[in-house]
């Protein structure tokens, strides 16, 4: 596989990152994941825009222009022959040559950038979309700026492992009083009486690019959308539930903490939104 590191295209075996890189030592880095379907990047502009926001909020500079960023995405998709898959992009504050809590001077230490692809043949035909996912709820003990897409992913990884251990597929994070924030790596939704409910944007959740597209498509299809918090109990009593992300698109949720939703199979609103999303974004 060919990867991109700080201006160079290299075989992955030859790519090198310093042990002093702040992304490695401090999780001082932000990332984006853009899906590829039929060789086409899905919603690149949205991901580039969110990257700008994450960088600005952390006082980091983008090491390449937007044009270069798009060109590197396309080049890696082409060089690696990606039909269906993902492009991972990470920008780190860089390598100050030592370990220090204080940020280095951005005029002296340049931000670093890494991109690589993951081939996922049949990404849009994931069999889980037919059966749906089982989720567990776990306390949301992440930091308070989940709107910044940092690489601090240890707790989401732990959440995924807790779900697997419980015989489930994923976890939903919940705050006090059982209010759902989002999934380990996706935004969470419920459907009740035809109304789509998903938590409002704030610093508490990632502002999903897929979320923005899904809400736009839902409203265009005259569906009712409510952007507000909901609890696990409300979700368990809902007709349907689903999650969205760049890698899962729209994925049905059929069980929450052992309680089956509705018929226990993916519901009609979820299936329709998945179809619309795949159709419109391809
Ligand atoms: N995760 N919430 C969290 C915590 C996420 O990590 C993600 C994305 C989302 C959905 O955002 P988007 O629709 O822009 O992908 C919501 C990516 C896919 C990942 O970490 O692999």
Image (cartoon, rainbow, N blue to C red):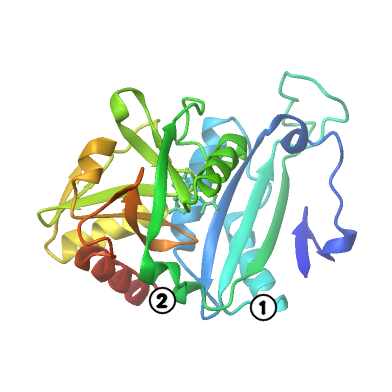
Read off the residue under disc 1: 78
Residue at image location 28% in from the left, 65% down from the top: 265
Query: Is residue 69 rendered to the left or right of residue 271?
Result: right
In this rendering, is residue 105 above or below 84?
above
Q: Nearer the viewer, residue 157 or 244?
A: 157
Q: Please provide percent x and percent y for residue 190.
A: 24, 49
Q: Judge whether residue 43 can be spotted in this image.
A: yes
From the top left corner, tell me how far across and down residue 257 is, in percent.
36, 43
* Viewer-nearest residue: 68 or 38: 38
SS at badge 2: loop
Q: Work out whether 254 lies above or below 98.
A: below
What label sits on residue 264 in the rendered view? none
Q: In this view, does 76 lie to the left or right of 8?
A: left
Q: Which residue is drawn at 49% across and 54% down?
A: 47
Quadrant, the C terminus = bottom left
Q: Tell me what residue is drawn at x 51 percent, y 29 percent.
A: 142
Residue 138 in the image: x percent, y percent?
44, 34
Instruction: Note whether residue 228 is visible.
Output: no
Where residue 282 is drawn, which disc sits there? 2
- Label 2 CB less than 8 angstroms from ligand 1: no
Q: How far across and down, in percent of the image, does residue 185 sit?
A: 49, 48
């Amino acid at each position: 596989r060919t990867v991109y590191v700080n201006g160079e295209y290299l075989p992955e075996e030859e790519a090198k990152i310093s042990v002093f890189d702040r992304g490695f030592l401090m999780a001082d880095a932000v990332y984006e994941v853009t899906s590829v379907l039929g060789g086409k990047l899905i919603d690149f502009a949205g991901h580039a825009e969110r990257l700008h926001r994450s960088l600005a909020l952390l006082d980091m500079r983008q090491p390449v222009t937007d044009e270069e960023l798009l060109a590197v995405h396309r080049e890696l998709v082409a060089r690696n022959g990606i039909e269906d898959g993902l492009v991972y992009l990470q920008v780190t504050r860089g390598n100050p040559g030592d370990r220090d809590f204080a940020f280095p001077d951005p005029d002296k230490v340049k931000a670093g950038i890494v991109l690589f692809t993951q081939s996922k043949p049949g990404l849009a035909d994931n069999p889980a979309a037919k059966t749906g996912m089982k989720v567990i709820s776990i306390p949301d003990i992440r930091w308070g700026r989940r709107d910044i897409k940092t690489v601090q992913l240890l707790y989401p990884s732990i959440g995924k492992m807790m779900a697997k251990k419980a015989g489930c597929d994923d976890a939903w994070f919940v705050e006090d009083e059982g209010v759902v924030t989002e999934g380990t790596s996706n935004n969470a939704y419920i459907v009740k009486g035809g109304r789509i409910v998903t938590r409002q944007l704030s610093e508490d959740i990632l502002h999903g690019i897929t979320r923005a597209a899904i809400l736009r498509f839902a409203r265009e299809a005259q569906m009712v959308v409510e952007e507000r918090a909901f609890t696990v109990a409300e979700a368990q009593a809902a007709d349907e539930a689903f999650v969205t992300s760049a890698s899962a698109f729209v994925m049905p949720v059929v069980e929450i903490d052992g309680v089956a939703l509705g018929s226990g199979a993916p519901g009609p609103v979820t299936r329709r939104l998945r179809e619309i999303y795949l159709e419109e974004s391809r």
